[in-house]
Amino acid sequence: MSRRRTLGPKKKIALLVSAMTVAGGGAFVMASTSNATPPATKSASESTACLGLATALGNNEKFIADQQANPDAQSEARIANRQAVIEEIKRKQEASGCAVGESAQDSQTAQPSQPAQGGEQAGGEQAGGGEEAGDAQASQPAESAPADNAGGGAAASGQQVCNGSTVTLSGEGGAPAASSNQFPAGTKLKVTNLDNNKSTTVEVTSVSGSCVLLNNAAFEQVREPGKFLIRRAVIEKVG
């Protein structure tokens, strides 16, 4: 006759404890996984960087809407370029932890009455234009801005313009340049960031939905680290 082996009371207790430990560990892992939540995104009202990107997105969306409402022979190419810029801005929003797709129109703030004194020309780092989706703009011919309904186009050289405007980026790549809805292509504008006294002089090369938008390379010359909006800016027409 065969004998059946039986476990003693101590071995039964040890096996039971081991089984409970394994089960408890699995339950803890499952609970930790189920409780994990994605990091919270920041809105434009919570972050200056997010506000700047939302403003840039809004300005580009406004530009597209204006082109669709008043199309011309170049509108299709301009719209395609700005749509690529919008996608690049959304990627910047995601990388910065901002709400992707949040849009805001160019805000207005109190403008200082006098230009900054001793503002230095920033020769700092340039943005990698080749990486930006807006590089298509480099291959597009320069466009004339719409007629200036605020008298900006008639401003004398050295005169302060765009009073009250904040400054953000257009999202376009290429060499330092600006776009405007008030000044024609070829106009030279000096933009001074009063928060760090950095300034840059750029040429308007295309139209936009704001008085002045700097492309990525120009904005890098005057920005504060981590910010995509210049609240206190002096803008002068210099040529």
Image (tube, grey):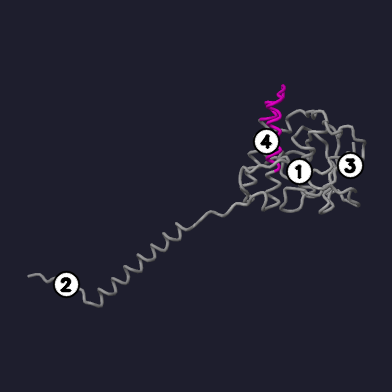
Q: Amino acid at mark 2?
A: Arg
Residue hosting label 1: 217
Asked whether 134 falls inside the magenta stretch, the response is no
Residue hosting label 3: 160
Mark 2 Cα within 10 Å, few/some/many (few <14, many 20+)? few
Asked whether 73 falls inside the magenta stretch, the response is yes
Say what secondary structure mark 1 lies in.
helix
Mark 2–mark 1 distance (CA, rounded to whole Å): 81 Å
Q: Amino acid at mark 4?
A: Glu
Are the residues flagged by discs 2 and 4 in contact, CB closer than 8 Å? Answer: no
Pick whichever, 135 or 146, lies toward us: 146
Mark 3–mark 2 distance (CA, rounded to whole Å): 98 Å
Q: Amino acid at mark 1?
A: Ala
Say what secondary structure mark 3 lies in.
strand
81 lies left or right of 18: right
Disc nearer the start of the sequence (2/1)? 2
Q: Amino acid at mark 3?
A: Gln
Disc nearer the start of the sequence (4/1)? 4
Mark 2–mark 4 distance (CA, rounded to whole Å): 79 Å
Residue hosting label 4: 61
Are the residues flagged by discs 4 and 1 in contact, CB closer than 8 Å? Answer: no
Mark 1–mark 3 distance (CA, rounded to whole Å): 23 Å
